[in-house]
Amino acid sequence: MSRGGRWATPRTAAGAVVLVLTLALAACATPPPLPSAPAPVPATPVRPVPAPAAPVGVSPTILPGWDDEDHLAAFNAFADGCRVARDPAARGQCDRAMQIRRTSRPVTPSLARAFFESGFSVVEAETADGGPGLLTAYFAPEYAARRSPDGEFDMPVLAPPAGWTRGQVLPERAAIEAAPPTTPLAWMRAEDLFFMQIQGSGYLTFADGSKARAAYAADNGRPFTGIARPMAEQGLLPPNGTSGEAIRRWLAAHRGPEARAVMALNARYIFFSLDPDDGGDPNGAAGIPLPARRAIAVDPTHWRYGDLVWISADGGNLAGARGSYRGLVVALDTGSAIRGPVRADLYMGRGAAAGEEAGAVRHPLRMWRLVPRG
């Protein structure tokens, strides 16, 4: 969903995905203390990343936590997304997964595990200094909206200006909000729109019960700037209390000039299109729906869409964080704040619960590429 703020979706992205998310948010657009993914960027063609040579005999069984993995869920996520792969060896393993689906009814957990162990070798990704990378998360937010301005629903969801071209630099957030360049598509609460722009997409519910999906359509060409760190520096939030949910609560409690001044610290602005809500998850930059908790946004200069990845992330330091995230995921998205070989934004799913968890993900990360055997 290629994250807009951290992750604007082509976005999806969200966090946005985040997500995943993120105000320093990933950061999805990817990021400082707040995850999130990636600012979302539109899905654009990227230079292919050469497939690394697979080390002989290095089995996925050496991965930390491999025995505890839900191999069947991972197999289904891989099989659903592997057609985006371009490497011949990866396409071969994708064909193999399709054959297993056709001939084995049902596919069992043991068969799924055997598929990975016989078909892939593992190579650990490394940072320049050999230290851990960073895991953040994003989600597909669901927000209340209105067809016309109504009380606290005073921020317009805007379509791109006529003639917009990718890479074009437009005015900063504050100037766009002061003089909207297009007719509003919908109206939202300020803090909700801000977070949807970070995620890169979202789902809107109107007063009459109708629903729509807001999808990333364009941006103002300005870099994403997380607001978590400056909020902590200004004493608006405690240093370890800059999760996405904490930032949202602060913005909602200070609606008006005070909140908008803080939000204006991020000059990036995302424009949207509105489409029917199909009830599913948003597409990532790879162009297919993101499976919850099994898809990540990555830096496409180091990873390829369709890559199978093992993540292991322990020791998050944000309030309310889970202890660890570990398992097989598929690289299906990207975001402007997701940069580096050991950097990932985990897509958590749709809705408030996914968003609350995504906002607390900021964990030291290790990543392994599962290299398909030819």
Image (spheres, rainbow, N blue to C red):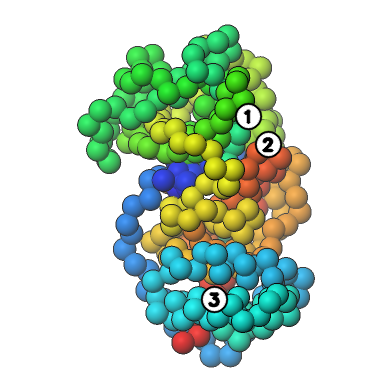
- Please state which of residues 23 and 177 is positioned toward the viewer in this rendering: 177
Residue at mark 3: 98
**Residue type, numbered disc 1:** Ile
Q: Is residue 179 visible?
A: yes
- How far across and how far down the image is residue 321, in percent? 73, 46
Residue at mark 1: 247
Side of 317 where 194 appears, left or right: left
Q: Nearer the viewer, mark 1 or mark 3?
A: 3
Q: Are marks 1 and 2 in contact (CB under 8 Å)?
A: no
**Residue type, numbered disc 3:** Met
Q: Give the numbered dot on residue 352.
A: 2
Mark 3 to mark 2: distance in Å?
34 Å
Q: Label 3: few (<14), some or many (≥20) within 10 Å? A: some
Labels 3 and 2: the sequence-earlier one: 3
Mark 1 to mark 2: distance in Å?
14 Å
Q: Residue at x 53, y 90 (%)?
A: 56
Q: Secondary structure at mark 3?
A: helix
Mark 1 to mark 3: distance in Å?
44 Å
Side of 69 where 117 appears, left or right: left
Q: Label 2: few (<14), some or many (≥20) within 10 Å? A: some
Q: Nearer the viewer, mark 1 or mark 2?
A: 2
Q: Residue at x 38, y 50 (%)?
A: 43
- How far across and how far down the image is residue 244, in percent? 63, 35
Q: Secondary structure at mark 1?
A: helix
- How far across and how far down the image is residue 133, in percent? 56, 58
**Residue type, numbered disc 2:** Ala
Q: Nearer the viewer, mark 3 or mark 2?
A: 3
The quarter of the picture where residue 79 lies is bottom right
Q: Work out which residue is located at the far bottom of the displayed protein and give it.
A: 56
- How far across and how far down the image is residue 319, in percent? 74, 40
Number of numbered labels in the structure image: 3
Q: In this picture, is 303 found above or below 24?
A: below
